[in-house]
Image (spheres, rainbow, N blue to C red):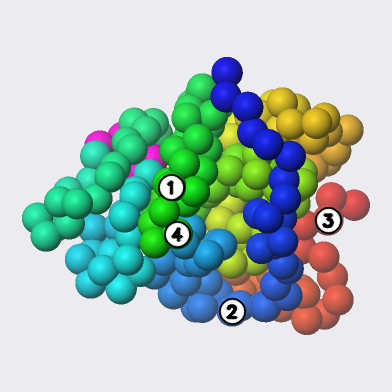
Amino acid sequence: MLAFATPTTQSSLVFKSTSSLSSRERLDVGRSASRILPRLYLSNLLTAEDEAELSSLRITHVVSVLEIAPKFPPSMSHLKILHIPIEDSAKTDILQYLEQTTHYIKSALEEDEKNAVLVHCFMGMSRSATVVCAYLIATTDMLPSDAVQFVRDRRSIVCLNIGFRDQLETYAAKFCGKGQKARGRYFKVNVGVIERIMFWKGGARIEAKEREGAHPLSLT
Protein backbone atom coordinates (compact mmCIF):
# COMPACT_ATOMS: atom_id res chain seq x y z
CA MET A 1 0.00 0.00 0.00
CA LEU A 2 1.27 3.44 -0.87
CA ALA A 3 2.20 5.79 1.95
CA PHE A 4 2.14 9.57 1.72
CA ALA A 5 4.25 11.92 3.75
CA THR A 6 2.83 14.37 6.27
CA PRO A 7 1.46 17.40 4.34
CA THR A 8 3.96 20.25 4.18
CA THR A 9 4.57 22.32 1.08
CA GLN A 10 1.33 21.23 -0.59
CA SER A 11 -0.74 22.65 2.26
CA SER A 12 0.76 26.08 1.74
CA LEU A 13 -0.80 26.18 -1.73
CA VAL A 14 -4.31 25.88 -0.34
CA PHE A 15 -6.42 29.02 0.00
CA LYS A 16 -10.14 29.73 0.03
CA SER A 17 -12.12 31.53 -2.63
CA THR A 18 -15.40 33.28 -1.84
CA SER A 19 -16.45 34.02 -5.40
CA SER A 20 -20.15 33.76 -6.22
CA LEU A 21 -21.24 32.77 -9.71
CA SER A 22 -24.57 33.07 -11.50
CA SER A 23 -26.27 30.07 -13.12
CA ARG A 24 -24.98 31.12 -16.56
CA GLU A 25 -21.46 31.53 -15.20
CA ARG A 26 -21.61 28.11 -13.59
CA LEU A 27 -22.30 26.52 -16.95
CA ASP A 28 -19.55 28.59 -18.58
CA VAL A 29 -17.09 27.34 -15.98
CA GLY A 30 -17.88 23.79 -17.03
CA ARG A 31 -16.74 24.50 -20.58
CA SER A 32 -13.14 25.30 -19.65
CA ALA A 33 -10.41 23.80 -17.51
CA SER A 34 -10.43 24.92 -13.88
CA ARG A 35 -7.15 25.50 -12.05
CA ILE A 36 -7.36 23.69 -8.72
CA LEU A 37 -3.72 24.06 -7.71
CA PRO A 38 -0.63 25.19 -9.58
CA ARG A 39 -0.20 22.67 -12.43
CA LEU A 40 -3.33 20.71 -11.50
CA TYR A 41 -6.50 21.23 -13.56
CA LEU A 42 -10.02 19.81 -13.70
CA SER A 43 -12.14 19.77 -16.86
CA ASN A 44 -14.77 18.08 -18.99
CA LEU A 45 -14.18 15.75 -21.94
CA LEU A 46 -14.39 18.38 -24.68
CA THR A 47 -11.71 20.48 -23.03
CA ALA A 48 -9.51 17.43 -22.51
CA GLU A 49 -9.65 16.70 -26.24
CA ASP A 50 -8.98 20.31 -27.25
CA GLU A 51 -5.48 20.74 -28.67
CA ALA A 52 -5.33 24.48 -28.05
CA GLU A 53 -6.41 24.12 -24.43
CA LEU A 54 -3.96 21.31 -23.72
CA SER A 55 -1.15 23.32 -25.27
CA SER A 56 -1.99 26.56 -23.49
CA LEU A 57 -2.02 24.82 -20.11
CA ARG A 58 1.13 22.86 -21.00
CA ILE A 59 -0.49 19.62 -19.94
CA THR A 60 1.88 16.66 -19.76
CA HIS A 61 -0.23 14.13 -17.85
CA VAL A 62 -3.94 13.29 -18.06
CA VAL A 63 -6.23 11.28 -15.80
CA SER A 64 -9.35 10.27 -17.77
CA VAL A 65 -12.17 9.07 -15.53
CA LEU A 66 -14.94 7.83 -17.81
CA GLU A 67 -16.12 4.66 -19.52
CA ILE A 68 -14.41 5.11 -22.89
CA ALA A 69 -10.91 6.46 -23.37
CA PRO A 70 -10.90 9.91 -25.01
CA LYS A 71 -9.41 10.63 -28.42
CA PHE A 72 -6.56 13.06 -28.01
CA PRO A 73 -5.21 15.11 -30.94
CA PRO A 74 -2.36 13.40 -32.85
CA SER A 75 -0.11 16.34 -31.98
CA MET A 76 -0.53 15.45 -28.30
CA SER A 77 1.17 12.06 -28.59
CA HIS A 78 3.59 13.06 -25.84
CA LEU A 79 0.83 13.01 -23.23
CA LYS A 80 1.04 10.41 -20.49
CA ILE A 81 -2.45 9.09 -19.83
CA LEU A 82 -4.06 7.15 -17.01
CA HIS A 83 -7.52 5.86 -17.93
CA ILE A 84 -9.95 4.90 -15.16
CA PRO A 85 -12.93 3.21 -16.92
CA ILE A 86 -15.89 3.89 -14.61
CA GLU A 87 -19.37 5.39 -14.90
CA ASP A 88 -20.83 8.16 -12.77
CA SER A 89 -23.06 6.08 -10.53
CA ALA A 90 -23.47 5.95 -6.77
CA LYS A 91 -22.93 2.19 -7.05
CA THR A 92 -19.58 2.53 -8.84
CA ASP A 93 -16.53 1.49 -6.83
CA ILE A 94 -14.23 4.47 -7.35
CA LEU A 95 -12.44 3.82 -4.05
CA GLN A 96 -10.38 1.01 -5.57
CA TYR A 97 -8.73 3.54 -7.91
CA LEU A 98 -8.10 6.50 -5.60
CA GLU A 99 -4.74 5.33 -4.31
CA GLN A 100 -3.58 4.80 -7.90
CA THR A 101 -4.81 8.17 -9.15
CA THR A 102 -3.38 10.02 -6.17
CA HIS A 103 0.00 8.38 -6.66
CA TYR A 104 -0.11 9.17 -10.39
CA ILE A 105 -0.87 12.87 -9.84
CA LYS A 106 1.62 13.21 -7.00
CA SER A 107 4.40 11.50 -8.94
CA ALA A 108 3.79 13.60 -12.06
CA LEU A 109 3.93 16.89 -10.17
CA GLU A 110 6.99 15.90 -8.16
CA GLU A 111 8.86 14.40 -11.12
CA ASP A 112 9.36 17.72 -12.90
CA GLU A 113 8.26 21.24 -12.01
CA LYS A 114 7.28 21.70 -15.66
CA ASN A 115 4.73 18.89 -15.55
CA ALA A 116 1.04 19.76 -15.43
CA VAL A 117 -1.84 17.34 -14.81
CA LEU A 118 -5.38 17.50 -16.20
CA VAL A 119 -8.04 15.34 -14.54
CA HIS A 120 -11.33 15.01 -16.41
CA CYS A 121 -14.50 13.00 -16.83
CA PHE A 122 -17.46 13.81 -19.09
CA MET A 123 -18.59 16.95 -17.28
CA GLY A 124 -15.76 17.59 -14.84
CA MET A 125 -18.31 17.47 -12.05
CA SER A 126 -18.36 14.16 -10.16
CA ARG A 127 -15.92 11.40 -11.12
CA SER A 128 -12.89 13.56 -11.88
CA ALA A 129 -13.71 15.87 -8.98
CA THR A 130 -13.65 12.87 -6.64
CA VAL A 131 -10.18 11.97 -7.89
CA VAL A 132 -8.94 15.52 -7.30
CA CYS A 133 -10.50 15.62 -3.83
CA ALA A 134 -8.78 12.35 -2.94
CA TYR A 135 -5.45 13.84 -3.98
CA LEU A 136 -6.04 16.88 -1.77
CA ILE A 137 -6.99 14.70 1.19
CA ALA A 138 -3.82 12.62 0.80
CA THR A 139 -1.44 15.54 0.36
CA THR A 140 -2.90 18.26 2.62
CA ASP A 141 -4.64 18.42 5.99
CA MET A 142 -8.10 18.64 4.39
CA LEU A 143 -11.09 16.61 5.51
CA PRO A 144 -13.41 15.28 2.77
CA SER A 145 -15.85 18.17 3.21
CA ASP A 146 -12.97 20.67 3.05
CA ALA A 147 -11.62 19.11 -0.14
CA VAL A 148 -15.03 19.12 -1.84
CA GLN A 149 -15.61 22.76 -0.95
CA PHE A 150 -12.10 23.74 -2.00
CA VAL A 151 -12.57 22.18 -5.44
CA ARG A 152 -16.08 23.61 -5.82
CA ASP A 153 -14.77 27.10 -5.01
CA ARG A 154 -12.60 26.76 -8.10
CA ARG A 155 -15.12 24.91 -10.28
CA SER A 156 -18.66 25.79 -9.26
CA ILE A 157 -20.39 22.90 -11.07
CA VAL A 158 -18.59 20.29 -8.97
CA CYS A 159 -21.07 17.96 -7.25
CA LEU A 160 -20.03 14.43 -6.29
CA ASN A 161 -22.70 11.74 -6.25
CA ILE A 162 -23.57 10.37 -2.81
CA GLY A 163 -21.73 7.08 -3.39
CA PHE A 164 -18.50 8.87 -4.22
CA ARG A 165 -18.87 11.06 -1.12
CA ASP A 166 -19.15 7.98 1.07
CA GLN A 167 -16.10 6.43 -0.56
CA LEU A 168 -14.14 9.65 -0.16
CA GLU A 169 -14.84 9.45 3.58
CA THR A 170 -13.55 5.87 3.61
CA TYR A 171 -10.44 6.87 1.68
CA ALA A 172 -9.76 9.75 4.08
CA ALA A 173 -9.78 7.37 7.05
CA LYS A 174 -6.35 6.17 5.90
CA PHE A 175 -4.80 9.54 6.64
CA CYS A 176 -4.47 10.40 10.32
CA GLY A 177 -8.12 9.86 11.15
CA LYS A 178 -9.35 12.34 8.58
CA GLY A 179 -12.36 10.25 7.67
CA GLN A 180 -14.94 11.59 10.08
CA LYS A 181 -18.23 9.78 9.70
CA ALA A 182 -19.54 12.00 12.49
CA ARG A 183 -20.65 14.42 9.81
CA GLY A 184 -23.19 11.69 9.21
CA ARG A 185 -26.48 11.52 7.39
CA TYR A 186 -27.08 15.27 7.31
CA PHE A 187 -23.80 15.87 5.51
CA LYS A 188 -24.43 13.14 2.94
CA VAL A 189 -28.07 13.94 2.17
CA ASN A 190 -27.91 17.70 2.48
CA VAL A 191 -24.95 18.22 0.18
CA GLY A 192 -24.79 14.98 -1.76
CA VAL A 193 -28.37 14.82 -3.00
CA ILE A 194 -30.28 18.06 -2.60
CA GLU A 195 -27.55 20.25 -4.07
CA ARG A 196 -27.19 17.94 -7.06
CA ILE A 197 -30.93 18.12 -7.76
CA MET A 198 -31.16 21.85 -7.21
CA PHE A 199 -28.26 22.55 -9.57
CA TRP A 200 -29.95 20.88 -12.51
CA LYS A 201 -33.52 21.95 -11.71
CA GLY A 202 -33.02 25.54 -10.81
CA GLY A 203 -29.72 27.24 -10.15
CA ALA A 204 -31.52 30.55 -10.46
CA ARG A 205 -33.85 29.63 -7.59
CA ILE A 206 -30.86 28.88 -5.38
CA GLU A 207 -29.40 32.31 -6.04
CA ALA A 208 -32.72 34.01 -5.39
CA LYS A 209 -33.04 32.32 -2.02
CA GLU A 210 -29.47 33.22 -1.13
CA ARG A 211 -30.19 36.87 -1.88
CA GLU A 212 -33.21 36.66 0.41
CA GLY A 213 -31.03 35.25 3.18
CA ALA A 214 -32.46 31.73 3.05
CA HIS A 215 -30.19 28.68 2.85
CA PRO A 216 -31.29 26.63 -0.21
CA LEU A 217 -29.92 23.39 1.21
CA SER A 218 -31.48 23.54 4.67
CA LEU A 219 -33.43 20.46 5.71
CA THR A 220 -35.25 22.30 8.48
Lateral position of residue 46 relative to residue 116, left or right = left
Q: CA distance from mark 1 to mark 4?
A: 7 Å
Residue at the disc numbered 1: 111
Q: Main secondary structure of the magenta part?
A: loop
Residue at the disc numbered 4: 113
Position of residue 199 relative to residue 219, above or below, is below
Residue at the disc numbered 2: 22
- Could you tell me the amino acid type at mark 2? Ser
Position of residue 86 relative to residue 47, above or below, is above
- Could you tell me the amino acid type at mark 4? Glu
Mark closest to the chain's N terminus, 2 or 3: 2
Any part of residue 129 in sight: yes
Position of residue 146 relative to residue 54, above or below, is above
User: Residue 218 got which mark?
Assistant: 3
Q: Secondary structure at mark 3?
A: loop
Mark closest to the chain's N terminus, 1 or 2: 2
The quadrant in which residue 153 appears is bottom right
- Could you tell me the amino acid type at mark 3? Ser
* Residue span colored magenta: 64-68
